[in-house]
Structures are given as structure tokens and as C-alpha cells.
Amino acid sequence: MSEMASDEADVNAYVHQKWLELTAGVEASIKEKWWNTLKSRYAEDIRKYHTFLHLKRMFQHMESLSNEIQNKDAVSYAIFFHDVVYDAHSQENEEQSIKLYNEFASESGISDKQELISKVEELILALKAHCTEAHTTEGMFGKDDVHYFLDFDISILGSDALEYKKYTQQIREEYSFLPKDKYNFLRSKVLQLFLQIPNIYATQAFREKYEKQARSNILSEIECLKMEN
């Protein structure tokens, strides 16, 4: 087995274990059916960054901050389903992902847990704006599950320069249908939005660990995009 295939198998095993733990009370056939759905969705050819590896990283962050998370089941389901529908052409990925989560909830018998379902929907929908009061207010820290969930999702922005470079290449591949100048323009626009708010990260833990590096990475990427034009 090649090193890449071995890494992929390790990631799959890790994410599968998380799924089994989360769905311990769900009927085996339903649990397996939805695991196969998740696996095939996150392995789609178009995906280069939005894969199981992204989910694994989010779960690892959650593990390291587990004492801060109030509703672990809701955050876990949100991690699993937040990118289950991923189409770079679409503006409706979050809504479509929630639709699939609701199908799972209905089939698995957890649809009577309305509080859990509402919380998962709220977390996934928060990705659309990716911005809370804690992001827009100088010196304010977010402490709710939504703040941690959003920070988990964009932790890659604060990774080391090499890892960040790999991430930017993967995102570019996911948008390979766009001409280079159009992609560079749209990507720069998104990156500028991060720089315009006081805080990229909502929580204290993430802001102290990743904020400075994230801003540096984003500035570097914007410069590279300018040079390409």
C-alpha cells in the first residue's frame, strides 16, 4: 500500500470510529447506509480539500477543546454533515447539507430530538456568513458551540506556510472550472473580507494560537494572486 493510500485509510478509520461512537444508538443498517453516503460524498472527484481529512482535523480540534463544547452530539453531527453536499458552483450547499442531515435524522429515529436537530441546523447555517458578534467586536471572545465550530472549520487559515500553500492549491483545483483571472479576483475578494473584520477567529484559544499566522497567510496569498494577474 502506498503512503498516500495508507494515510487515507488511517483518516477513514479515524472518521469511521467517530461515526460509530456518535451513532451508537442508531440501528446498524441505517448507521451503515449513512456511513456509506458520507464516505462516497466526501470522496467525490471534485473534492481536493473538502474531504474526510478536513473532518478529521475538525474532530481533533474538538477533542483538544472538549471541555468547552456544550452539545458534543450537535457539533459532531454538524462536522459530519456540514460539507456533505459540496458543489463549488452552488450558493445552496449549507441548505442542501441540512436537507440530507434531516433525512438521516428521520431514518435514524432521532427526529424526535428537536433540540439536537435545530442545533445542528443552526451550526451548519452559521457557515454561510461565517461571522458572529465575536468576529466583529474588538477584544470580544465567543464561548458558544457555534464559535468553536466556525473556528474548527477555518483552522487551516492559521496553519504553517507549507500546509497553507497546499490548501490554496486544493481550493484552486476545486474551482478549476473558473478562468484564472476570474478565480483570482473572487478569491481575493473573499480573503479581503477576513482581513476587514477585527477577528478571524471567534474563540480565545484559536485567536491566540492562529490569528497572527492566518493574517500573514492571507496577506501572502493576496500578494501571490496579484502577481499572477
Image (tube, rainbow, N blue to C red):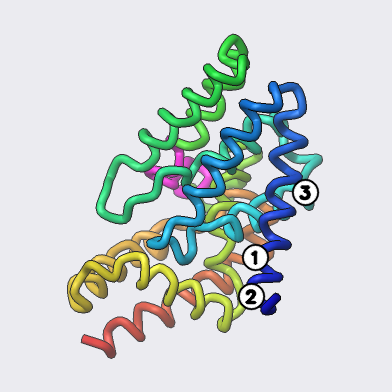
- Who comes first in sequence, dot 3 or dot 1? 1
Give the residue pinned by disc 2.
4
Horizontal side of residue 16 vs 199, given as left or right: right
Q: Look at the magenta stretch and give its main secondary structure.
A: helix
130 is within the stretch colored magenta:
yes
In the rendered structure, which amino acid carries the disc numbered 3?
Glu
- Local crowd size for mark 2, using a 10 Å CA cut-off: few (<14), some (14–19), many (≥20): few
Closer to the camera, 43 or 184? Answer: 43
Q: Residue furthest top?
A: 112
In the image, residue 129 sits, relative to residue 77, either above or below, namely below
Magenta stretch, residue numbers: 125-136
Q: Position of residue 121 (x, y in %)?
A: 49, 28
- Local crowd size for mark 1, using a 10 Å CA cut-off: few (<14), some (14–19), many (≥20): some
Looking at the image, which residue is at 35% across and 72% down? Answer: 172
Give the residue pinned by disc 1.
8
Q: CA distance from mark 1 to mark 2?
A: 6 Å
What element does badge 2 sit on? helix
Give the residue pinned by disc 3.
63
